[in-house]
Amino acid sequence: MAEDNLFMEALREIYDPEIPINIVDLGLIYRIGEKDGKVHVDMTLTARGCPMAGSLAQEVKERLEKLEGVEEVTVHLIWDPPWTPDRINKEALERLFNPSLADSATDPAQPC
């Protein structure tokens, strides 16, 4: 679906505060659905007790609300299935362990 790709590209601008990988490549986005301008996101975090949980979900909501045609965004934090490092996409993992490939746009905030 073209909208799903647009949403995922927009969310690639958001980085996990602890790991310098965007939340899409990190595997935190489980599902995005859209109907009549209403977007629903199921996402998780790398750690259940992360104090940044509310602010990261809010950042997702605000980023998607900037897209044309989006009227409302609902973000649900889910814990099943739990996040594991296996969800990180291969290219992002390579960038993480090879600093010469790292994104220059990363700006890690407070760690969880």
Image: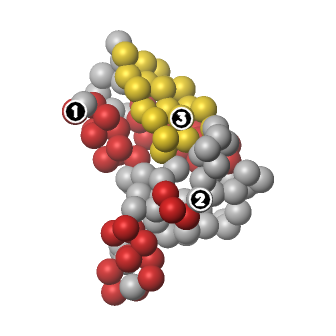
What distance separates the C-alpha of mark 3 from that of mark 1? 18 Å
* Residue type (three-letter) at the residue carrying disc 2: Thr
Q: Which residue is mark 3?
A: 42
Q: Give the residue drawn at x 39%, y 85%.
A: 98
Q: Nearer the viewer, mark 1 or mark 2?
A: 2
* Residue type (three-letter) at the residue carrying disc 3: Asp
What distance separates the C-alpha of mark 2 from that of mark 3? 16 Å
Q: Earlier in the sequence, mark 3 or mark 1?
A: 1
> Tell me, what colour scheme is on the image?
secondary structure
Q: Which residue is mark 2?
A: 84
Q: Give the residue drawn at x 44%, y 82%.
A: 97
Q: Give the residue drawn at x 38%, y 77%.
A: 94
Query: Which secondary structure, mark 3?
Result: strand
What distance separates the C-alpha of mark 1 from that of mark 2? 27 Å
The quadrant in which the N terminus is found is top left
Give the quarter of the image for residue 79: top right
* Residue type (three-letter) at the residue carrying disc 1: Ala
Give the quarter of the image for residue 10: top left
Query: Which secondary structure, mark 1?
Result: helix
- Residue 72 image offset from top left, x and y in percent: 46, 21
Q: Residues within 10 Å of mark 2 (few under 14, many from 20)?
A: few
Outermost residue toward the top in this view = 36
Q: Earlier in the sequence, mark 2 or mark 3?
A: 3
Is residue 19 toward the left or the right of residue 92 in the image? Answer: right
Is residue 108 toward the left or the right of residue 69 in the image? Answer: right
Which mark is drawn over residue 101?
A: none
Q: Which residue is mark 1?
A: 2
Q: Nearer the viewer, mark 2 or mark 3?
A: 2
